Each structure stands twice: as C-alpha cells, then as structure tokens.
Image: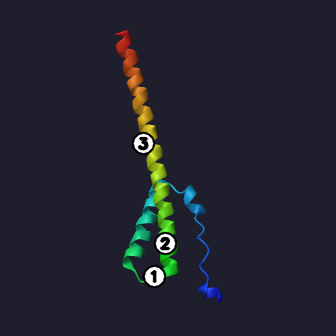
Amino acid sequence: MASTDRPAAAPDLSDIADMGYEQAREELVQVVSRLEAGGTSLEESLALWERGEALATRCEQWLDGARERLDAARARRADAEGDDDARG
C-alpha cells in the first residue's frame, strides 16, 4: 500500500485544552463554515470534524464550569438570606 493510501494519523488537538471559551467558540465557527462550504478532501474534512468536536467539547467544559460557579454563588446567597431570616 502506498503512503498516500494510508489513513492519516489523528490531528494534534492538544492546543485546544488551553483555549478560553471565546477562542474555542470562534475557531469552532470557522471549522463549521469550512465544512459547510465543502470543497475539502475527505482527509481534511475528517480532520476538521475531529477538531470541531474537540472545540465543541472545550466550549461545553467552559459552560459547565460557569454553570457550576453560578449555582455555587446562588447557593451562598440563599444560605446568607436563610441566616438573615433565622436571626430576624
């Protein structure tokens, strides 16, 4: 089998772990646009798809973390209001 017939190795996605939400979201938008535009080879489309999946996962991680922080802040506020009610 010729080297061009072998499937390419999975792309290096390690840079995504260090991305902030806005950066990951913006790149995800670009990846989706490129996939929707078509005209890419199967190899490139697969690599874009894999990168898009990793970027979407990173965005979800950021959103989950933000949700947890909001829930914790609400719980602290509810506890503080409960303490005030118990004293009053």
Q: Is residue 20 left or right of residue 75?
A: right
Query: Which residue is painted at 48% across and 44% down in the image?
Result: 65
Question: Closest to the observer: 81 or 38?
Answer: 38
Query: Which residue is painted at 51% across and 67% down in the image?
Result: 51
x and y percent of residue 33 in the render? 39, 72
Under mark 3, the amino acid is: Arg
Distance of label 3 from label 1 (alpha carbons): 37 Å
Distance of label 1 from label 2 (alpha carbons): 10 Å
Query: Which residue is painted at 39% across and 31% down in the image?
Result: 74
x and y percent of residue 81 in the render? 37, 21
* Disc 1 element: loop
Question: Residue 48: which disc?
Answer: 2
Under mark 1, the amino acid is: Thr
Can you say whether 60 is above or below 1 in the image? above
* Disc 3 element: helix
**Can you say which quadrant of the picture contains the N terminus?**
bottom right
Location of residue 87 by image quarter: top left
Question: Residue 67: which disc?
Answer: 3
Location of residue 56 by image quarter: bottom left
**In contact (CB < 8 Å): disc 1 and disc 2:** yes
Q: Which residue is mark 1?
A: 40
Q: Earlier in the sequence, mark 2 or mark 3?
A: 2
* Disc 2 element: helix
Question: Residue 65: which disc?
Answer: none
